[in-house]
Amino acid sequence: MTNAITINNLTYGYPDQDPLFHDFDLEVQEGQWLSIVGHNGSGKSTLAKLILGLLEANSGTISIFGQQLTVETLAEARAQVGMVFQNPDNQFVGATVADDVAFGLENRQVPSEEMPKMIEAALKQVGMADFADREPHTLSGGQKQRVALASVLALKPKVIILDEATAMLDPAGKSAVLQTLKDLKNQYQDQLTLIVITHDMAEAALADRVVVINDGQLAFDERPQDLFVQGQALKELGLDQPFESQLAQALPKAPNQYLTKQELAAWLSTLKD
Ligand SMILES: Nc1ncnc2c1ncn2[C@@H]1O[C@H](COP(=O)(O)OP(=O)(O)OP(=O)(O)O)[C@@H](O)[C@H]1O
C-alpha cells in the first residue's frame, strides 16, 4: 500500500533548544485513520507543522505520497494535506460560512462560476449546508469546526490533520465533529487519510492505529484494542485509558478488556439483575 506520509530520520529542535525529535521515523499508510497522542509538550503539534512544511526539519526527510518535502515541492505537498486547528475562532476569514469556504478556493484560483457548487457540496458533507449564509460568529464551536472541515474538504485533500480540533468543544459539539469524521471516512474509505492529534483517549480509540509520542520517540504504535488495555504503561507516559476500557477492566465479567462504547453498551444491556 502507498504511504501517505513517510518520515525518515527526522531531527528537529526549536532554535536554542534541545532537539524534540531525534532520528524519528513514522509511516502513515494511505487511507489510514491514525491518532497521535502524548503528554503535553511531547511534540505532537510540532510534528504536524513539520508535515505541513510550516517548520523545516534540521535533518532527515518527510515525504508526502512519495514526494520529499523541499522548498520546490512544498506547494504541491500542501495541496494534498488539509489541517484543522484547535481554536474554532481562529480559523475564519470569511464574513459568512460560504465566504469562508470560498476563501481557500479563491486561493487555488478556482473559477468563480464553479465555486457555489463546490461550496455547497463541501458544506453538505459536514451537515452545514443550511448555514451557508450565517455569520461564523453566530455558530456553536462544533458547527465552526465542521465549517473549518468543510473549508479543508472543498480543496479535496488526500490527508487531513486535525490538531486537537475537538479540545475546545462541548460534548455535543465534539460528538458532531467525530460523527462527521466517521461519515467522511465511510464515504472516502482509502481515498482519505486522517491524522488526529488528541488528548482525548476515546477520540484516539476511533482510529485504526494509535501512536504515542514520548521524548521525541514512538513509545507505542498499536491498534487501539492492543494499546488501551495497557493501563499502567499508559499511566507512566502521563496518559489515561478511555473510560470504556477502564470500565470494562473494572467489571470482572466483561467479555473483553477492551470494548468500544457501542460494544460496552451492547454488553451492559444484556445483563439482567
Ligand atoms: N514556536 C516555538 N518556539 C519554541 N519552542 C516551542 C515552540 N512551539 C512549541 N515549542 C516547545 O516545543 C515542545 C513541543 O511543543 P508541541 O506544541 O509540539 O507539543 P504538543 O505535544 O503538541 O503539546 P500539547 O499537547 O500541550 O499541545 C514544547 O516544549 C514547547 O514548549
Image: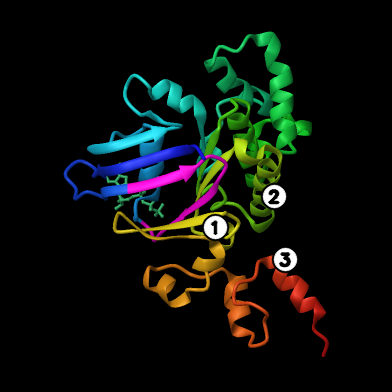
Residue 37 belongs to magenta span: yes
Q: Secondary structure at mark 3?
A: helix
Location of mark 2 (residue): 179
**Mark 2 neighbour class, 10 Å CA radius: few under 14, some 14 to 19, many 20 or more:** few
Where is residue 49? Give x, y as percent: 38, 38
Can the viewer see residue 49? Answer: no
In the displayed structure image, the side of residue 237 where residue 128 appears, left or right: right
Question: Which callout, 1 or 2, points at the residue further toward the start of the chain?
Answer: 2
Quadrant in which the C terminus appears: bottom right
| Gap in angstroms between the C-alphas marked 3 and 1 | 15 Å
Residue positioned most to the bottom: 273
Q: In the picture, residue 157 is in which quadrant? A: top right
User: Mark 3 belongs to which amino acid?
Assistant: Gln
Q: Say which mark, if any, is on residue 204.
A: 1
Location of mark 3 (residue): 262
**Residue situated in front as seen by the camera: 98 or 179:** 179
Which of the two marks, 3 or 2, is nearer to us in this view? 3
User: Mark 2 belongs to which amino acid?
Assistant: Gln
